[in-house]
Image (tube, rainbow, N blue to C red):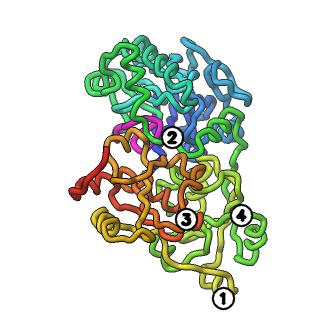
Amino acid sequence: MFTQQFFVEGLGCASYLVGCEAEGIAAVIDPDRDVQKYLDSARNRGLKITHIIETHLHADHVSGNTDLASRTGADIYLHEKSGAEFPHTKIKQDDVIKLGNINLHILHTPGHTPESITLLVSDTTRAQEPWLALTGDTLFVGDIGRPDLVGVEAARGLAGDMHESLSHKILPLNDDLLIYPGHGAGSLCGKSIGSMRATTLGFERKHNPALAPRELDEFINFATSDLPEQPGNHTRIKAMNRKGVKPLGEVKKQPLTIQESIPYFQRGAGLLDTRSKDEYVKAHVPGSVHLEADDQLSNRIGFVFPPDAPMVLLLENENQYEQVVFSLARVGYENIVGYLTEGLDVWKKMGLPLTSGDVKNIEPVELNQLMQNCSNGDCPKVLDVREPWEFNQGHVPGAVLIPLGQLSSRLEELNPEVPVAVICASGNRSQSAAALLGQKGFKTVYNVLGGTGAWIHSGLKVER
């Protein structure tokens, strides 16, 4: 038996290749949009991909299942409760998918979603009992799948399903069972997923707080409280995965001169500037969105850019194009017109507008001094973009709460003429929020470095 884990930094998504080398066949579990890596790995091991299995319909990233199926001819497998609208094979509790000497035993483990499954993987040349479990978004390292991404109204019911799945299907299994989850650190599909990318059931039984013995009502309250913000654009991503995603195909570079890009801008295309912050501060196109081409791009784009709007890219260098395209495609951003081959020096020579400056980074002590010494007209409004449960644990005095996932729809609650200081827990969410405010024309925007944690560490007062 051959297994390989593939991990996407930032999104925290894990996918797997499981193959029987004796028969030369393999399955891919939970593929992401960059399917070439599965094809390359299978080819290198002499394997043909014959099965594509989804543990559930994802809400945080777009699947590569249809793309992989179009390239391999493999069938796609989903639980019968998925409601998927594209061609697939339905599976149910206790079905067994055979890959030569490997058995994949289906456990229906609803909780994160109604259709969630766990795959118990046996190498029958060694033993009939399962060697490892691919738990999808049911059981993570140090955590379990959140129950609210299908809809807040369904969360308590799904939390009850999760209690049943864990108590009667997962926890009765052997302690030495290897656990390979569908997400690791960085994912928003759990509260506090550990950074290790695999574990054992015995270790989780002892040390995973979500597996502590609880009566049903107590577990439901635990599972539905203190949840992080929902992934940006998650409702649309879920719908795309249910309908079936148009295969992305081979990513080919689409260079554009500035002159060629102008008609796209005139028809409503946006400019995504992925250069370093230092370069952006020196000069940038007014109204452009700035998000660096790092492993957080997939997480942040959904909060600051309309998903269906045409997009032109400004890159640090053209070799980043494929990386950026996959980062965007993983969260359903596919309308990329191309990238600019000419720099802003050419933009300026053509008489097109440029501006400089950016969101201003500010230390908590500096912000406190500014708040103490300002007059009414220039006093910053502190905008806290955390979740309500975080806000209630302690916040900057006088701060207004608008969770990051709600900010784009609640901008009218803020005055763009008044300075805004954006704060979160550590500085990550506030950076995304500040980028949105800057793109929407807010005159003065501060990003509070280190977030509320740094504010408290500096000895500054909080309200509760």
- Are circles 3 and 4 on residues that touch, CB within 8 Å? no
**Residue lying at the far bottom of the rendered structure:** 349
Mark 1 residue type: Lys
Q: Could you give the CA–CA distance between mark 1 and mark 4, rounded to whole angstroms?
A: 22 Å
- Residue drawn at x 53%, y 58% as measured from the top left: 414
* Foreground tag (3 vs 4): 3
Mark found first going from the N terminus, 3 or 1: 1
Please report whichever mark, 2 or 3, sits nearer to the chain's N-terminal start. 2
- Residue displayed at 36% across by 70% down: 374
Q: Nearer the viewer, residue 401 or 130?
A: 401
Q: In 3D space, how far apart are the residues under numbered discs 3 and 4 (Cα atoms)? A: 23 Å
Q: Give whichever of discs 1 and 4 has the lower sequence position.
A: 4
- Of badges 2 and 3, the one in the foreground is 3
Q: Mark 4 = which residue?
A: 269
Q: Residues within 10 Å of mark 2 (few under 14, many from 20)?
A: many
Tell me how far mark 3 sits from mark 1, CA to CA. 31 Å
Q: Name the residue beneath numbered marker 1.
A: 349
Q: Quadrant of the C terminus?
A: top left
